[in-house]
Image: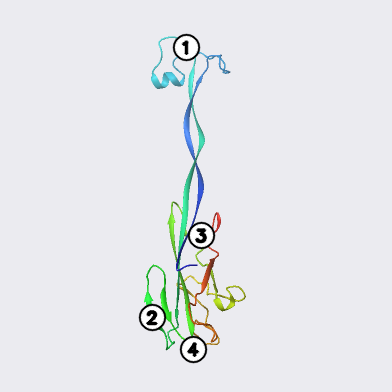
Amino acid sequence: MPKYTTQSASWGVWTCTKRPFEVTLNYNGYNGLPAVVCKNGGCDYCKRYGQLPYEHYCIEYQTKTDWVYTQVTSGITVTSEMDLKPDSLVPTAELKWYTPTYENAWEIGSGYGVNVEVTTNYFKSGNCTSNDYTTTPYVIAYFPEFNYMTYNRLLDRATNYPIRLKANKWSQYEHRVHFTPLWYPDGIYRVKTQLLSVWTPVGEI
């Protein structure tokens, strides 16, 4: 990933609620209902509005319910930042220039260790909750001396940030470092990382 990346996903959740509504039943014999004459103001219409002074067919009211469906859109945006810097014990480390929007430029000697750190942030929208996405992603680091293909290192998968390299057993102090090869030529040394396993209801980001 570049120094900063942003990926998003969105999905819809349907909810349904019961909605009451009133149905008017006119017992006049013409709409599939039998002809029933109201006697002494006994139908619903007379009870509601007062008894009519003349003979009429019964009018009844029934309350029924139907389902109302509503879709609520939710989403998650994941921002990631990778930081590549010399280990704290590198004696030759020197910061050459700094650009907040992209990267630091350090100069170190070959053979020393570098730290890889990845920080992720999650921004929810709609009705998104912490149960809708995973927050312990995998991060894989790829290195230029292997052409970003042959070998890689899996960073510690943990909820505490930043996500860092695992402790290197070849480090005297068990630091979380990757040692650059002695033969690596002068110039830019750029590590690539890939963020995996951020899952949402619509798949992996």
Between residue 73 and residue 43, name the one nearer to us. 73
Q: Which dot, 4 or 3, sits closer to the camera?
A: 4
Q: Which tag, 2 or 4, sits closer to the chain's start?
A: 2
Q: Which tag, 2 or 1, sits closer to the chain's start?
A: 1
In terms of secondary structure, where does tag 1 sit? loop
Residue 52 x, y percent position in the rendering: 41, 13
The residue pinned by badge 2 equals: 95
Do callouts 3 and 1 mark residues in contact (Cβ within 8 Å)?
Answer: no
- How far is mark 2 from mark 1, CA to CA? 97 Å
The residue pinned by badge 3 equals: 133
Image: 175 above or below 40: below
Do callouts 1 and 4 mark residues in contact (Cβ within 8 Å)?
Answer: no
- How far is mark 3 from mark 2, CA to CA? 38 Å
Residue at image x 47%, y 31%?
21
Visual colour scheme: rainbow
Q: Which dot, 3 or 1, sits closer to the camera?
A: 3
Q: Residue type at mark 4? A: Tyr
Task: Identify the mark at residue 195; answer none if there is no mark.
Answer: none
Compared across the picture, whether 93 is left or right of 36 comes to left
- Neighbours of disc 3 within 10 Å: few (<14), some (14-19), many (20+): many
The residue pinned by badge 1 equals: 56
Q: Which tag, 1 or 4, sits closer to the chain's start?
A: 1
Q: In the current view of this chain or complex, which residue is farthest to the right?
A: 150
Residue at image x 46%, y 74%?
117
- How far is mark 3 from mark 1, CA to CA? 63 Å
Which of the 4 image quadrants contains residue 3? bottom left
In terms of secondary structure, where does tag 4 sit? loop
In terms of secondary structure, where does tag 3 sit? loop
Task: Identify the mark at residue 173; answer none if there is no mark.
Answer: 4
Count of picture labels: 4
